[in-house]
Image (tube, coloured by chain):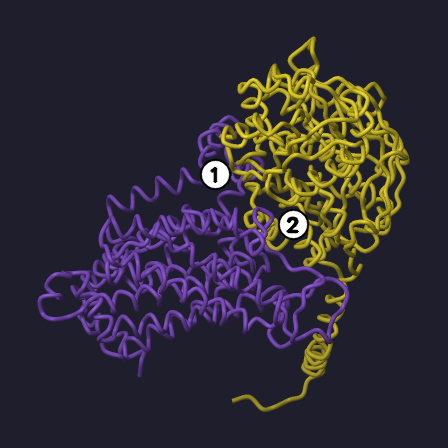
Chain colours: A purple, B yellow
């Protein structure tokens, strides 16, 4: 696997620059896909962070956590509480959201990591479901139950009580609200954090610490016999990954100041597992692609209805048009889960390494093709670094 | 190389370019004052229908969507015109809104605040809708309404019955045609007194979110005002399907009335299970045990079957009403879909029409003017008699129906019998009692 081969740091610089450019240019290149609107791009970035963090645990150590949504929820609730209590500035919300989620991860990780394999998964799942149910029952004074935690006019907000206008305040970063510049302000805040998160993940993948995590994945017993106490490393990986989820959760609250318990439901935990597997476990970019794909399906495919389908197929003769709409209709709109399920099956069966395996195979195929003719396939990227 | 010549054309070009560059900030500032999703010269405008297509309120959501599609047809001048024939005063001309054809986009709220807001955001940011409407849960309504206030897009609430929607969480950009829990309590009180007397012990089961909370509070206040005693109030999760663990304690609590603050599939399940536990055949304190469902709908009655017979509740509207508006609506809905509409369908249809009509009245889609046209708007012929959109809290005031599950239904839809049409004056209240603030016109 590519993570084991120590690549030159130069290549990483190129990767980092390309990644940053791709993220920052999202509003341009997503336009043809109909996905270049702020809310969806924010979701791409937020769930990208979530999936990257999840991948640090699952991809590197092989420990499959089925309760990561709990940290997402904790991050969201903390962030909204920071808005309510401290300030509408997003910085305290982001910092505390990440930290409290980290603390929560220490607690859950300390207990769950006493087991491995399926037992670990079940333990994390149990903790997440406990958090979810508690948010709906005994913790309603903190979480506001089903209605969701929301801002109110009479919140204390001790740091910015002076500048109180009419109407509810919006989350802001030193005066720039998330809605400014047609919502792009919110996206770029998420996007820049995504780039930072990706960079940290890259450093972890390349670090000796990352190597130890991969060693745990390949054979934990052997690590133990060589005198390594693996648990502290696992716990650190778990906490880092929980903090990523907390950051993603607080960003959700930043872009939309509301926190609901359904963010902690097991389906949300399952979703990030799907994202990671779909994109490619243990690869750097894969989880991001998976997150993007799932969110794209959820938001764009689910909005297709018969009217739109008729428009799409309107170039066909009428009976063919109706036939096509009849065939496609169950797969869009409410049926988007069906399409996603089918896609998931195809990928798991034919590309067990996820989308990234497909991409790598494609690159290898192109390279082989080109090396046959000129043989300088490798020289190209180096020249561009120059 | 060519020599540098200053041509007239070049000077003009440079001048034009400089002018453009200088005026760019002006363009931006003028845009900042314009409203979001201004249709400009476009031939059509879009409405966003955000309804629950999955989850406990999906039945209502499906019916709401049917009503919206019908409303769009009628606004565009297709079909038989429906309530456009009976609404007074009417500004719509049956050629769309302000001459623009109405189109729509749909979304699934899943009865989750998160999903509903994501879906509404998509409609506003991507599809460019001018108005979002729908919803069958007050939790969702409050969440979407505050989002719409931030975005400066009008929200015409669908079925939402909590006092909060136009009470403590009211917003300048949100409007509600549906009645609320306070009105249910005020309308139901005298009927309960007449039917069940002044000496009763009530036990509440309540859906655990803002609608359930305010309804429980309103009904509790009313019944305690009658002299009833409240034995206990128990909150149940919205996602609950099995209510047996909540119903068993009722049997031994000494209560003789069970009040179900449930709606949709929640209510169908809790009522069915309460009847199966034999609550209605019991005698407690020397009286017949009674069940009350303060908010009723025909769809729920259909789901609950025989269990609903004889049970009292309130409803916003019922298809069996005999006024011209109701009959016109039932006729065109029935012709389209083959069965009568529910109260959810009715309120959503009316909301879509009211918004379109307000745009026509204001002569613009600018939400500030549309809001002003809707505030204090008095209308008739929409099935509820004379109705007013109160300016102080954007709540519609009209008569409330007290209904009873029909003992001898003549058809599978004839499930609710109107016991009393409670006049508006009896259910009116001071807008200040719930607190909250509408917020600014300009956002």
Where the C terminus of chain B falls, by quadrant?
bottom right
| Tag 1 secondary structure | loop
Q: Tag 2, which chain? A: B
Q: Is residue A359 visible?
A: no
Q: Chain of mark 1?
A: A
Mark 1–mark 2 contact, CB under 8 Å? Answer: no
Q: Quadrant of residue B97?
A: top right
- The foreground one among B260 and B408 is B260
Residue A207, x across and y down, in percent: 25, 75
Return the residue at label 2.
B144
Task: Measuring from the top left, give residue A110's x and y in whole percent.
Answer: 31, 62
Of tags 1 and 2, the one toward the viewer is: 2
> In the drawing, does residue B155 fall left or right of residue A30?
right
Instruction: Between residue B63 and residue B315, name the one nearer to us.
Output: B315
User: Left or right of B435: which side holds B345?
Assistant: left
Is residue A355 depicted above or below A247 in this figure? above
Residue designated by label 1: A332
Of helix, strand and loop, which one carries label 2?
helix
The quadrant where residue A342 appears: top left
Residue B145 lies, in percent from the top left, at 69, 50
Disc 1 to disc 2, how far (Cα)? 24 Å
Crowding at dot 2, Cα within 10 Å, few <14 / some 14-19 / many 20+, comes out as many
């Amino acid at each position: 696997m590519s993570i084991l081969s120590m690549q030159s740091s130069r290549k990483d610089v190129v990767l980092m620059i390309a990644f940053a450019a791709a993220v920052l240019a999202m509003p341009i290149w997503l336009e043809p896909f109909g996905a270049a609107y702020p809310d969806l791009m924010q979701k791409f970035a937020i769930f990208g962070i979530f999936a990257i963090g999840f991948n640090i645990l699952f991809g590197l150590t092989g420990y499959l956590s089925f309760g990561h949504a709990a940290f997402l929820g904790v991050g969201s609730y903390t962030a909204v509480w920071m808005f309510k209590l401290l300030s509408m500035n997003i910085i305290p919300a982001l910092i505390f959201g990440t930290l409290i989620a980290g603390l929560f991860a220490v607690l859950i990780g300390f207990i769950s990591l006493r087991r491995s394999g399926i037992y670990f998964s079940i333990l994390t799942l149990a903790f997440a479901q406990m958090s979810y149910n508690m948010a709906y029952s005994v913790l309603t004074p903190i979480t506001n139950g089903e209605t969701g935690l929301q801002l109110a006019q009479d919140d204390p907000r001790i740091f910015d009580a002076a500048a109180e206008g009419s109407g509810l305040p919006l989350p802001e970063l030193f005066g720039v609200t998330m809605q400014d510049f047609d919502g792009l302000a919110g996206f770029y805040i998420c996007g820049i954090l995504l780039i930072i998160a990706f960079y940290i993940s890259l450093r972890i993948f390349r670090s000796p610490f990352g190597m130890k995590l991969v060693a745990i994945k390949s054979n934990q017993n052997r690590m133990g016999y060589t005198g390594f106490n693996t648990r502290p490393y696992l716990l650190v990986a778990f906490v880092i990954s929980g903090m990523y989820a907390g950051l993603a959760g607080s960003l959700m609250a930043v872009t939309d100041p509301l926190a609901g318990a359904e963010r902690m439901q097991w389906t949300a935990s399952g979703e990030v597992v799907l994202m990671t597997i779909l994109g490619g476990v243990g690869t750097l970019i894969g989880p991001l692609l998976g997150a993007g794909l799932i969110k794209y399906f959820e938001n764009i495919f689910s909005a297709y209805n018969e009217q739109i389908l008729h428009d799409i197929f309107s170039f066909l003769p009428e009976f063919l048009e109706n036939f096509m709409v009849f065939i496609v209709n169950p797969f869009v709109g409410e049926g988007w889960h069906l399409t996603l399920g089918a896609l998931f099956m195809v990928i798991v069966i034919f590309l067990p390494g996820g989308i990234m395996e497909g991409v790598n195979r494609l690159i290898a195929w192109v390279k082989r093709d080109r090396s046959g003719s000129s043989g300088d396939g490798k020289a190209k990227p180096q020249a561009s670094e120059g | 190389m060519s020599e540098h010549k200053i041509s007239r054309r070049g000077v003009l070009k440079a001048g034009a370019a400089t002018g453009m560059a200088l005026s760019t900030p002006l363009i931006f500032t003028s845009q900042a004052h314009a409203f979001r999703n201004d249709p400009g010269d476009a031939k059509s405008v879009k409405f966003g229908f955000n309804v629950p297509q999955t989850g406990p309120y999906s039945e209502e959501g499906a019916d709401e969507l049917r009503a919206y599609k019908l409303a769009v047809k009628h606004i565009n001048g297709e079909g038989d015109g429906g309530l456009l024939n009976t609404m007074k005063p009417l500004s719509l001309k049956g050629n769309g809104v302000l001459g623009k054809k109405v189109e729509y986009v749909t979304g699934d709220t899943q009865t989750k605040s998160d999903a509903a807001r994501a879906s509404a955001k998509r409609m506003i940011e991507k599809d460019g809708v001018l108005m979002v409407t729908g919803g069958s849960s007050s939790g969702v309504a409050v969440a979407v309404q505050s989002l719409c206030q931030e975005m400066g897009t009008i929200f015409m609430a669908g079925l939402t019955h909590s006092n909060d929607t136009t009470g403590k969480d009211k917003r300048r950009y949100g409007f509600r045609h549906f009645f609320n829990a306070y009105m249910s309590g005020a309308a139901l009180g005298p009927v309960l007194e007449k039917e069940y007397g002044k000496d009763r012990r009530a036990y509440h089961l309540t859906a655990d979110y803002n609608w359930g909370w305010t309804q429980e509070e309103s009904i509790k206040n009313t019944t305690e005002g009658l002299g009833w005693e409240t034995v206990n109030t128990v909150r149940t999760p919205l996602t609950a399907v099995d209510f047996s663990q909540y119903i068993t304690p009722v049997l031994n609590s000494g209560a003789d009335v069970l009040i179900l603050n449930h709606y949709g599939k929640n209510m169908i399940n809790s009522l069915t299970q309460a009847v199966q536990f034999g609550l209605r055949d019991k005698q407690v304190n020397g009286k017949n045990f009674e069940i009350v469902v303060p908010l009723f709908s025909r769809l729920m009655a259909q789901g609950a079957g025989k269990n609903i017979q004889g049970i009292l509740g309130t409803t916003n509207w019922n298809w069996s009403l005999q006024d011209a508006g109701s009959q016109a609506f039932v006729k065109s809905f029935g012709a389209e879909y083959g069965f009568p509409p529910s109260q959810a369908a009715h309120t959503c249809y009316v909301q879509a029409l009211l918004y379109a009509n307000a745009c026509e009245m204001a002569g613009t889609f600018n939400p500030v003017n549309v809001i002003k046209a809707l505030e204090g708007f008095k209308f008739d012929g929409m099935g509820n008699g004379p109705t007013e959109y109160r300016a102080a809290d954007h709540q519609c005031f009209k008569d409330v129906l007290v209904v009873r599950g029909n003992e001898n239904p003549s058809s599978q839809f004839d499930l609710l019998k109107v016991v009393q049409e409670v006049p508006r004056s009896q259910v009116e209240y001071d807008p200040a009692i719930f607190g909250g603030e509408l917020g600014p016109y300009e956002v």
